[in-house]
Amino acid sequence: MADGGRLILLGAPLGNVGDASARLREVLASADVVAAEDTRRLARLARDLDVTVAGRVVSYFEGNEERRTPELVEALRDGAVVAIVTDGGMPSVSDPGYRLVRAALDAEIPVTAAPGPSAVTTALALSGLPSDRFCFEGFLPRSGSARRSRLRELAAEPRTLVFFEAPHRISGTLADLAAVFGADRAAAVCRELTKTYEEVRRGALGTLAGWAAESGPRGEITVVVAGAVPTAGDRPSDERLRAEVAEEEATGVSRRDAVTAVAALHGLRRREVYNLVTGG
């Protein structure tokens, strides 16, 4: 590999161009190659930012990722700075990019990022639901039976869940969430984040399913759902709780914080977990 070749992931605004970072502007203007999910959207973004993209622009989307990845890796090997940008948010997070990142790493090419907005964390923060621990599930399966099967696997997940969904499937997805998770489970539907018609609907899944069926919401949609509340029968064994505290401590946190995190995860009193760990 020639000196200087590196891959840069660009976090693009979700909608409001005012969220674009100075590094995004700098990299768009200086990269040798810009791989864009939609070249027309890239052109519009560059105009809005008053940036001239001097490098070669290529399309890089789901339909041509497999074919184009080797070409981009070859450019990286030749010393090019390649930037990848999707329609909004970070590449590779339910968007094109992972395949290229993996190929670049396998070729021992440096990979870095100019981080930016993320629909996942933005929706989580706006939802009003617990955000100390969460899991991102991306898009659920498209077919109803496969979607319900996946939701049954997630029904007991205690962490807050974040999903992406297409507008034409949101009504069916919310109905399935209400049926599998329970109509009273708290949730939030975040639509068109940072855009002119941004909307966040908070409420029980049953209520949100009824709203979606009636209104047919449009635009980019992120759904945040509260985790399951553990019941007495879901309590992990003493051995498991001790092991989880040890795992937390191994990351460098204090015992106090480790105990607090494990107790919160399982809906237990902190004192109960502390006594298990210390033998108190």
Image (cartoon, rainbow, N blue to C red):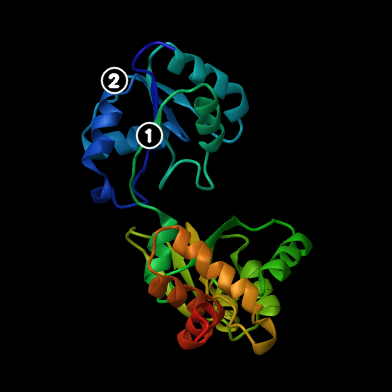
Up-down relation of residue 72 to residue 18 (above or below): above
Image location (x, y in percent) of residue 259: 46, 75
Residue occupied by mark 1: 112
Q: How far apart are marks 1 and 2 (CA)?
A: 20 Å
Mark 1 Cα within 10 Å, few/some/many (few <14, many 20+)? Answer: few
Q: Position of residue 263 (x, y in %)?
A: 50, 79
* Lateral position of residue 178 relative to residue 265, left or right: right
Asked if one can make out residue 174 in the rendered structure from this viewpoint, the answer is: yes
Quadrant hosting residue 260: bottom left
- For the residue marked with disc 2, what is the amino acid? Ala
Q: Which of 147 and 235 is in front in this view?
A: 235
Closer to the eye: label 1 or 2: 1
The image quarter containing residue 213 is bottom right
Residue shown at 64% from the left, 74% from the top:
239
* Residue at image point 45% right, 64% down: 249
Whether residue 118 sits left or right of residue 186 in the image: it is left
Depth order, front residue of 107/227: 107
| Residue lying farthest to the front in this orientation | 279
Residue assigned mark 2: 54
Which amino acid, mark 1?
Thr
N-terminal-most mark, 1 or 2: 2
Q: Is residue 157 left or right of residue 2?
A: right
The quadrant in which the N terminus is found is top left
**Tag 1 secondary structure:** strand
